[in-house]
Amino acid sequence: MSSNSFGKLLTVTTFGESHGPAIGCVIDGCPPGLAIAADDFRNDLDRRATGKSRYTSQRHEADDVEILSGVFEGLTTGTPIALLIRNTDARSKDYNDLVDTFRPGHADYTYLQKYGIRDHRGGGRSSARETTMRVAAAVIAKKWLAEKFAVRVRGHLAQIGALVPRAFDWDAVEANPFFWPDAAMVSELEQYITALRKDGDSVGARVTVVADNVPPGWGEPIYGKLDGDLASALMSINAVKGVEIGAGFAAVAQRGSEHRDEMTPQGFLSNNAGGILGGISSGQPVVASIALKPTSSILIPGRSVNLEGDPVEVVTKGRHDPCVGIRATPIAEAMVALVLMDHALRHRAQCADVGYITPRIPGEVSGKR
Amino acid sequence: MSSNSFGKLLTVTTFGESHGPAIGCVIDGCPPGLAIAADDFRNDLDRRATGKSRYTSQRHEADDVEILSGVFEGLTTGTPIALLIRNTDARSKDYNDLVDTFRPGHADYTYLQKYGIRDHRGGGRSSARETTMRVAAAVIAKKWLAEKFAVRVRGHLAQIGALVPRAFDWDAVEANPFFWPDAAMVSELEQYITALRKDGDSVGARVTVVADNVPPGWGEPIYGKLDGDLASALMSINAVKGVEIGAGFAAVAQRGSEHRDEMTPQGFLSNNAGGILGGISSGQPVVASIALKPTSSILIPGRSVNLEGDPVEVVTKGRHDPCVGIRATPIAEAMVALVLMDHALRHRAQCADVGYITPRIPGEVSGKR
Amino acid sequence: MSSNSFGKLLTVTTFGESHGPAIGCVIDGCPPGLAIAADDFRNDLDRRATGKSRYTSQRHEADDVEILSGVFEGLTTGTPIALLIRNTDARSKDYNDLVDTFRPGHADYTYLQKYGIRDHRGGGRSSARETTMRVAAAVIAKKWLAEKFAVRVRGHLAQIGALVPRAFDWDAVEANPFFWPDAAMVSELEQYITALRKDGDSVGARVTVVADNVPPGWGEPIYGKLDGDLASALMSINAVKGVEIGAGFAAVAQRGSEHRDEMTPQGFLSNNAGGILGGISSGQPVVASIALKPTSSILIPGRSVNLEGDPVEVVTKGRHDPCVGIRATPIAEAMVALVLMDHALRHRAQCADVGYITPRIPGEVSGKR
Amino acid sequence: MSSNSFGKLLTVTTFGESHGPAIGCVIDGCPPGLAIAADDFRNDLDRRATGKSRYTSQRHEADDVEILSGVFEGLTTGTPIALLIRNTDARSKDYNDLVDTFRPGHADYTYLQKYGIRDHRGGGRSSARETTMRVAAAVIAKKWLAEKFAVRVRGHLAQIGALVPRAFDWDAVEANPFFWPDAAMVSELEQYITALRKDGDSVGARVTVVADNVPPGWGEPIYGKLDGDLASALMSINAVKGVEIGAGFAAVAQRGSEHRDEMTPQGFLSNNAGGILGGISSGQPVVASIALKPTSSILIPGRSVNLEGDPVEVVTKGRHDPCVGIRATPIAEAMVALVLMDHALRHRAQCADVGYITPRIPGEVSGKR
């Protein structure tokens, strides 16, 4: 399978570079009969878009989606759905200084070492511009999951630098440009980001995605585990350096008597597992978190080398985010939704005849996420 | 592809249950001409084996590997290598109490929900017994990587409960039953595990794997990234709840000016990236860490439900580890080695003609891991 | 995916050499709850077996199947099913003459050119011994297809040398050692094969497989077409040089007005399509035929070269079939059954919600195959 | 993997319908550094194009290729190459009569049965329009194979109806609109096609593709055999009902003493194998043939049913070929080239270290194809 594709039954293939003529994707395996229109993509693309707030990158792309195939009279036909977005606001000359310099923390050096050639403009293929198509593709997955299983996939920023939410409210998340679940802290975040930008520096972030109403039974042991597939899907997002399911690294210091999620007829008593046991969904909310590194594209000069191998000082101009983690929220949701839909299809392929198994323990526990 | 297989060009398929007649694997894609004998598997299987120390599970398996195919006159032929290990010490009756009870934190419930049927004996397919074959398969990968690229893949325990090493010495790691890099702390660990066992409880752990001498250029963007494939490979190990590359979740609180690994003609000045940029190896050591949850098989009674959905109290007898993270060290090494070899083959498939690219920055930085 | 695996959702991986310790396979993706016992494999393995009649090879293998995994208390569990057959009647010394000689028409030369090493004993991995595992794996597919859809997969010899059946009766097929559908010709065939053996020569054959009751809708355009997957599955059988669906090469000389299968409410008026249109089953019987070359292992001396590149004369002793096509019948059935089951699972993954579509045209046409 | 993708390491994904806004493809895995420009696609697209001669369909598409990604400053970068062609001459209203009627011999009925929905215009996804992208993708494969291995992939019409060439000359093939290797017969073919069109009927054809200079060693046993992959690739072409390698179905009536290709230090004495033994190339020319059915889109009325299941009479107007086999020649070449390049990459992934093996027997035999 192409390494620019992912998903076994719902397969998404993306293409395009940051400063090429267009980016696009091909989504194959979608069940027929799902209503899809160009407008459906608008909301999530806006959520991901750079330039929508002054706290993220200043690149302004229209991100108008053209549906090239796979939809007939408003419904998916079961054949591949191709989506295309033209690049309109690429400023390649911003990158002229970088033709023969490597940016520390970027893929410049590794792409050149691998391919012997690279498109230096805006990161080329390694740019986060590619994630636009993940978000677009996931619009279809989210819609199908919602219609068919009432599955809802939502994400929020869970940490930025040392700041963590002091309260949690899903309603707050979409009401501020940081996907931050604590409305009372928004002005604090604004000041934080403004100070970062003034410093010419950047910071890391943690994003958490929660999928509610995932039925038990999704996921394929051993190497197609739901958590294994979430891990690669999330780690493939630009700047991600870590993935956790449920308690994640906190489990290192937990005791078994604390970590195990005890079961009662009324529901599980906790969700340290993040909704996945043995690679298979348990019916509890699926919870995944990611660590995003601070972008390396900063104004503070850094040491690097040029194509001749000589030492140089690098300052990254371009238009970049002081915290790439902010707009990673819809991207992380996208990857979770795509993995879930793929596994929904995989599950019914093998186990369509299994039916409803009792006892079924309620997934939600009062007062818990 | 089978969900019990992994790897695109070096493909490993495992089979077998904890208490079935045998476990085994098929390794396909190995280059021809590599010397392999049954004895080669001994060392790593012993390192992984339960029952080799009183700090891990008391199941005693001989783990004698039979090579069924793919090796002729001591050399790999390029055809699939099948390995078989008979189960000899399975005590299925230990699990009779569990026929109609779900163990919290185990895959019992999810397997039943998925398949409508389950082999309850010792976890069946979800048992860590399966990881024996990963370790066996990786013996071949480690050997090939070492002979061809001098790549060395080593792991160590990096945390257990709240304990972290106060010193680091690779030589210490293999000299104690905990893969612990600080010799001075070994008696402390012994007491810790003994106390846990006395409590009938368990604890989580953190394991770190380091691969030295990985050349730059391995890894395939976008969805076949080296870190993405490591993430799924490591997350697929039993009890793993988190995966980090390089700085991992510590990157959340880092500044860009701190995180980016500056480059000089003499080498990188740090390795927060864990040897991977844009999904492609940089020539620095590849560093991955995992979080392992505390095993849920403990003597402390827990609440659960039975097949009728009624509440029950569960005490797991069987033979289990107070800390599954200890013997996860060679398993994590195995997954890293298998992913690396797969990517070595993938890289030369596409980029064999690229050759040596200058400038090449030395991967190792004096005094750093 | 391993090149020793096939099938997307029902995935079969085989291993083993003709003269190694064992052959085996791993079948993954089988739905849970199917009853499978070791005895189920007996009938088809006997049908395929060499040495069961004096008209085929004289190698006598017990072909006792050991189920290593994936079946618990007589039912499939949804986890990988591993099957093992020990080689017991390999006479490797028969092949000592061939250590440094290439047999014309065999894979000796190409395996050496590819791998730089080869197991010369009995063809090693290229031996038709491998097809035993295809037949074994397909026992499961045939059983599932029959129970779930009443699909019946049957094959027969359709030509041997210049001989073609003058009458057709499915009941005759299993009543003679040639899978020949014309009982009146059996003694003629016996004489033909006896004469061939006396000549020390061999002959080609044509085998046809028919699958009845395949529902409409199986097959995935464009590169996962049902006929495309049948083509590779059948071409992968040893000695196969051609594959036809329906009218096959006869279509070259047909007119459109003759070839198209006209449709009426009572049924299709012909089946030149072989039950597949646009890569998707139509509800008519799926009909595929293969051409098998005459085995090159014959007593008549032939020109070849040795490892030094010098000309030599080769006479193949060993134990071989004068017509490998005879026992290819159950192997061809096996490949058809495995492809069908894979596509049944693939179809319901994507289209489980489509349901029964009207109008549905009856597949069978009175008096037609 | 998407069923609209093919190839393991060189992976081509196509999308688009006959009468949608555009068709396109994504080619992944191409080595970096290959020079590619939009002009490179012109020749083969013209060879495939309908409307270029009065003997094929009258649809006139410009088929201008836009390179959307993967090429930077004229060279492939190793990232996915997306190609786009806008549909400009689709006359959807020609198909209005077919909204509720099934065309015999077409995919109308099976698409509806599978998906419960279909794009009836011009065959939708099942149209041969899709093959345009195969030809475009293969331009890259042909170029790489030629530059790297001097492999040349050429096809010709080998039979149309009952007509077969009486002489063979590669130079003739490109000098007439029929890809016919016997210049003396061209006027005979013209009259034949003209008569067919006058009859409102169509006829089948046979196309043969020959790939010269394929090195020995390409192809992966057992289920990734070179001939197995050629079989599925060729069978996936619209209207193909049969695939042969080398002698193909003629092998059924051959004796072993005749079929086996004897070997001498000067070369093989024949090429019944079609250049493939045991699924691996032998160094002889790779020879594959396909049978194409007569198109079912003809003016002669035929019996069918409508969406209500009532009997109707169908006459296909639209713009169609009296012999689709003619323009299948470059399509068949395309599939062979793509499979060969995929296997070239696969071979060097596993066997790059094997090197040149002696003895190597010359592939070409004087006076033979």
Image (cartoon, coloured by chain):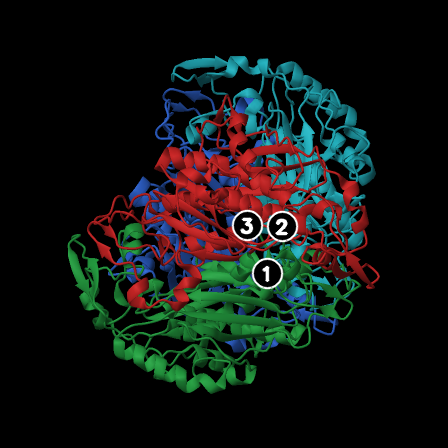
Chain colours: A cyan, B blue, C green, D red
Q: Is residue B51 visible?
A: no
- Front disc: 3 or 1: 3
Chain identifier of the residue bearing label 2 in the image: D
Question: Where is residue C240 shown, x and y percent of the image?
Answer: 42, 63
Along the line of sight, which residue is nearer the eye, B211 or C167?
A: C167
Question: Where is residue A66 shown, x and y percent of the image?
Answer: 73, 33
Q: Which residue is mark 1?
A: B296
Q: Is residue A175 visible?
A: yes
For mark 1, give the secondary structure: loop
Give how far apart the Cα atoms at labels 2 and 1 are.
76 Å
Which three-letter amino acid code belongs to the residue tagged 3? Met
Question: Where is residue B283 shown, x and y percent of the image?
Answer: 40, 32
Which three-letter amino acid code belongs to the residue tagged 1? Ser
Along the line of sight, which residue is nearer the eye, A65 or D256?
A: D256
Chain identifier of the residue bearing label 1 in the image: B
Same subunit: marks 2 and 1: no
Location of residue C86 (image quadrant): bottom left
Location of residue B369 (image quadrant): top left
Comes first in the chain, label 3 or label 1? 3
| Crowding near the residue tagged with mark 3, few <14, some 14–19, many ≥20 C-alpha atoms within 10 Å | many
Which three-letter amino acid code belongs to the residue tagged 2? Leu
Same subunit: marks 3 and 1: yes
Q: Are marks 3 and 1 in contact (CB under 8 Å)?
A: no
For mark 2, give the secondary structure: helix
For mark 3, give the secondary structure: helix
For the point 74% across and 20% down, the residue is A54
Q: Which residue is mark 2?
A: D196
Residue B235 is marked as: 3
